[in-house]
Image (cartoon, rainbow, N blue to C red):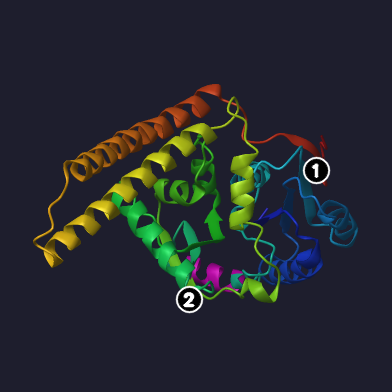
Amino acid sequence: MKLSIISTLYKSSMFLEEFCQRTVAAAQKYAGEDFEIILVNDGSPDTSLPLALELQKQYQSIKIVDLSRNFGHHAAIVAGLELSVGKQVLLIDCDLEEQPEWLDIFTEKMDQSRADVVYGVQQQRTASRTSNFFGELFWSALNFMSSVRIPHNPMTCRLMTRKYVDALLTVQDRVLYLAGTFAWAGFTQVAVPLIKTPRIAIQKSSYSLSRKLMQVADSFASFSVAPLMVLFLTGLLIWLGSVIFALGILIEKLLFPQTVLSGFTSIMISIWFLGGTIILGTGIIGLYIAKIFQEAKRRPLYIVRKTYGYENEQ
């Protein structure tokens, strides 16, 4: 098969029909009828799965993988990759922020550069200035601390060769961060600057701050690293508070040299700073131990409830 197109479903019903229509058109233009579209239902709570099953009757190229629950975006992507058979694999989100018509750009770039991967990067971020600032700060800090160069603002959308996908699937991490894994795998990778369709015109992101906080709050200590994360954040807040307090005292001393620091103030600064530093360090070590704990359990990344459109349907 010439081309496999993979997308994950989570609250995707409102744009799934248009996505499939445009994706089929783009795929037919490039590969004729020699392609497949793999939709991975990541425990979507809406009508994404029933709608996908209806669209499958209209488009015979669609195959559906229904996971037993929501395992997360990255795990769902791996499920799609493992079931794909195309010589080239296009990974794309179905929320129409990323355009199916970019397939033309990616295939042309891959032919010209003979790259193993052609991926999109956000030429212009569509979020708020504050979000953009923290996004840039995150990527800069991540690259500073990592031995692998991870591109800034990468998109999900990417065209990959079968050779690269097979190499990527040899990674058996249970704590999976795909942006880093994509870069770590190596091969020849070429970036294409693109502009996403602003999500505000479509739907609010399901990756909201409230959802992330709820996921942490709902975690059980016996099945998650939430307590260790709380320990880390507590140490970080105490440490930052001590630094701010110390800076305030220093500024006061510079502006008012006659000020005499009491012994109580000096002791409190020392206790706060050292205590916060110790807790922060313990929290960081705890995070690494938590990763070891999750890897040692060797639970599967995902569980498939049922597949549709495959010869040997589960």
Of 137 and 14, which appears nearest the observer?
Answer: 137
Residue 22's x, y, as percent? 74, 71
Q: Quadrant of residue 252?
A: bottom left
Residue 116's x, y, as percent? 46, 56
Q: Residues within 10 Å of mark 1 (few under 14, many from 20)?
A: few
Residues in magenta? 103-111
In the image, is 161 to the left or to the right of 27? left
**Can residue 238 be seen in the rendering of this structure?**
yes
**Can residue 89 be seen in the rendering of this structure?**
no
Q: Quadrant of residue 283?
A: top left
The correct choice, above or below, for 285 with respect to 152 in the image is above
Name the residue rendered at 89%, 62% in the picture: 58
Q: Residues within 10 Å of mark 2 (few under 14, many from 20)?
A: few
Give amino acid for label 2. Answer: Gln
Kindly check if marks 1 and 2 are in contact, taking CB atoms under 8 A apart as contact. no
Of 225 and 265, which appears nearest the observer?
Answer: 265
Whichever of callouts 1 and 2 sits on the residue coming sooner in the sequence is 2
**Circle 2 is placed at which residue position?**
124
In the image, is 314 to the left or to the right of 171? right
**Circle 1 is placed at which residue position?**
310
